[in-house]
């Protein structure tokens, strides 16, 4: 069993990631696994963490990456996946952030996303045990509290990685909205990986009209390939955007609005374009800046406003099944850049911060 792993480590916000050897735990505990990563896809949160727009005091050095899959090198005694299937060397698995199982969120609400002790790789200092729980590593330690899933062979590494955050987040948001009624009008705010995936999900779910709002133009063009009937550019100012969306959505407005953008005016725009009795789902507002919500319109339109936070292993499982079922339905691979090695991971994060790549792919086995 390896005793150290190569890792791309964030030591200072906004600075290049540093390639280091990071220790690994001496032994694999019961319920845990040591995995050789075959694919890590980067997410907007990794970019926010890198830039320092999102930060946790005292958490540097940290290892970014929370969408990843790999092959088990060693499993602890009794390690199984979330469905009770034994996990052993050679198995290909994905997993969800760890949860504690005994806090109010876990035990009473029974919602893993509400766990008070949720463990993301980026909540783990790279210089303290178990060190390497983020995705930008060659060997990743998957803790006992992380719900694991054996992966079917027909779901590609990139798809399974993306299921670890982006895809499960969107599927949970649709679930929180109560599903998407066939023939309904859907507005997706955001044209990043989440927005484009949500566009595809809305289309597949049977929406009548899907309107995607975002930028830059190449991402809007991608949204069309993933099922958008129309797009609205964020180059327009807020009032122009609202007017254009209303024009496209028709007199009644949008039955569902999904915020996958998190910009300061998303709530105002969502409420303005939502139909009477429409549903607004807030999924992308990860920042802490206050965003004004026109409460009079929420009342007058009798809107349902729901928050949706990431996803748990159930959403992950559904995401894997979604990719299996709809493998040929959309050009999924267009979302992903060519895989690169750990040494290029920092450049990928920078490129994503400039809205270059939609989803960067790191394969730590590459040089
Ligand atoms: Zn908990
Ligand atoms: Zn994420």
Image (spheres, rainbow, N blue to C red):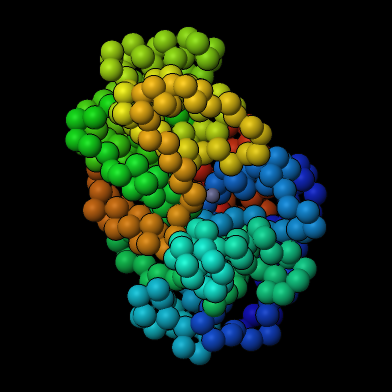
Q: Position of residue 266 (x, y in %)?
A: 51, 27
Q: Is residue 339 visible?
A: no
Q: In which quadrant will I find the N terminus? A: bottom right
Q: In which quadrant will I find the C terminus? A: bottom right
Q: Is residue 348 above or below residue 63?
A: above
Q: How many marks?
A: 0
- When asked about the image quadrant of residue 117, the answer is bottom right
- Residue shown at 54% from the left, 66% from the top: 104
Front residue of 278 and 14:
278
- When asked about the image quadrant of residue 173, the answer is top left
Q: Is residue 197 visible?
A: yes
Q: Position of residue 347 (x, y in %)?
A: 66, 43
Q: Position of residue 49 (x, y in %)?
A: 68, 47
- Residue shown at 72% from the left, 75% from the top: 129
Q: Is residue 101 above or below residue 230?
A: below
Front residue of 6 and 104:
104
* Side of 224 relative to 65 (left or right): left
- Residue shown at 69% from the left, 64% from the top: 124
* Side of 341 relative to 170 (left or right): right
Q: Is residue 112 above or below residue 212?
A: below
- Residue shown at 19% from the left, 30% from the top: 183
């Amino acid at each position: 069993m390896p005793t150290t792993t190569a890792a791309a480590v964030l030591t200072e916000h906004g600075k290049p990631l540093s390639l280091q050897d990071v220790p690994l735990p001496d032994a694999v505990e019961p319920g845990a696994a040591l995995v050789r990563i075959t694919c890590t896809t980067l997410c907007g949160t990794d970019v926010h963490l890198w830039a320092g727009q999102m930060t946790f005091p005292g958490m540097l050095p940290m290892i970014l990456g929370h969408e990843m899959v790999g092959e088990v090198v060693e499993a602890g005694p009794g390690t199984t996946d979330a469905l009770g299937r034994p996990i052993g060397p050679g198995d290909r698995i994905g997993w969800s952030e760890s949860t504690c199982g005994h806090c109010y969120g876990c035990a009473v609400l029974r919602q893993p996303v509400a766990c008070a002790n949720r463990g993301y790789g980026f909540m783990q200092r790279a210089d303290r045990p178990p060190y390497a729980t983020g995705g930008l590593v060659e060997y990743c330690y998957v803790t006992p509290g992380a719900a694991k899933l054996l992966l079917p062979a027909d779901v590609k590494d990139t798809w399974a990685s993306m299921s670890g955050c982006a895809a499960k987040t969107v599927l949970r948001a649709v679930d929180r909205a109560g599903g998407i009624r066939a023939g309904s009008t859907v507005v997706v705010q955001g044209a990043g990986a989440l927005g484009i995936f949500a566009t595809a999900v809305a289309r597949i779910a049977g929406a009548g009209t899907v309107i995607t709002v975002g930028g830059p133009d190449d991402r809007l063009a991608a949204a069309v390939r993933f099922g958008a009937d129309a797009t609205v550019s964020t180059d327009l100012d807020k009032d122009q955007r609202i007017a254009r969306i209303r024009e496209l959505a028709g007199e009644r407005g949008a039955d569902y609005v999904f915020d996958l953008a998190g910009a300061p005016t998303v709530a105002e725009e969502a409420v303005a374009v939502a139909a009477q009795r429409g549903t607004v789902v807030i999924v992308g507002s990860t920042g802490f800046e206050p965003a004004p919500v026109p409460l009079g319109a929420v009342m007058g339109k009798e809107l349902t406003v729901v928050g949706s936070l990431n996803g748990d292993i159930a959403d992950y499982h559904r995401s894997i099944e979604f990719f299996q079922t709809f493998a040929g339905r959309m050009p999924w691979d267009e979302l992903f850049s060519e895989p690169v090695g750990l040494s290029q991971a920092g450049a990928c994060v920078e490129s994503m911060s400039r809205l270059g790549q939609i989803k960067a792919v790191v394969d730590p086995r590459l040089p």
